[in-house]
Image: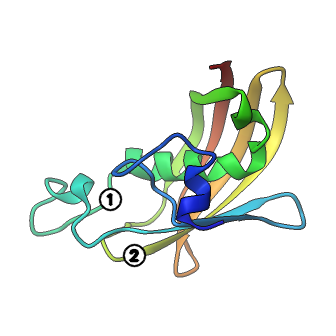
Amino acid sequence: MNREEIKQILPHREPMLLLDSSSLQTDGSACSSYRIPEEAWFCQGHFPGNPIVPGVILCEIMAQSCFQLMIEVFKDHLVLYRGLDEVKFRGTVRPGDTCTISSTLVEQKGSLYVCEATLSVEGKRCAQARITLAAVPR
């Protein structure tokens, strides 16, 4: 899916739509990508002269990448964070970098969906998290 197709499912819009493409893999995982803009608003003050993508933005990119695993849920529900666990930041992400995100649904309990996601740049793992999302009726 390209950015316009993603907008048909995710409610996010610029500047908070943080995916450029996404696809469901044959093994059931999802693979997404996002190129950090050179003038990303979230790097303007983080840090002047040495811009680094904030960890909270990396978590949001990973959470948005999980949508591909729950496409049917988005038809009638708004999907919201319920929790972040086992979050680790292993590398620096900067403007101009292209993030590759891999996500897998590991558990579903009623309206809760637990996913594991990793975010890499040029093959180097930069962030990972266990993300719990909740499907809330619209």
Residue shown at the point (31%, 69%) measured from the top left: 37
Residue 12 placement (x, y as % from top left): 47, 43
Residue 88 placement (x, y as % from top left): 52, 50
10 Å crowding of disc 2: few (<14), some (14-19), many (20+): some
Q: Which residue is mark 2?
A: 97
Residue 45 lies, with reference to residue 71, above or below; the image says below
User: In which quadrant of the rendered image does the N terminus lie?
Assistant: bottom right
Residue 96 placement (x, y as % from top left): 33, 77
Q: Is residue 20 left or right of residue 134?
A: left
Mark 1: which secondary structure?
Answer: loop
Residue 91 placement (x, y as % from top left): 43, 66
User: In which quadrant of the rendered image does the C terminus lie?
Assistant: top right
Q: Are marks 1 and 2 in contact (CB under 8 Å)?
A: yes
Query: Which amino acid, mark 1?
Result: Val
Mark 2: which secondary structure?
Answer: loop
Residue 128 visible, this angle: no
Which residue is the extreme one toward the right?
27
Q: Which residue is mark 1?
A: 53
Residue 27 lies, with reference to residue 115, above or below; the image says below
Residue shown at the point (36%, 51%) measured from the top left: 14
- Locate residue 130: give its quadrant: top right
- Locate residue 10: give its quadrant: top right
Q: Is residue 110 left or right of residue 2?
A: right
Residue 21 lies, with reference to residue 138, above or below; the image says below
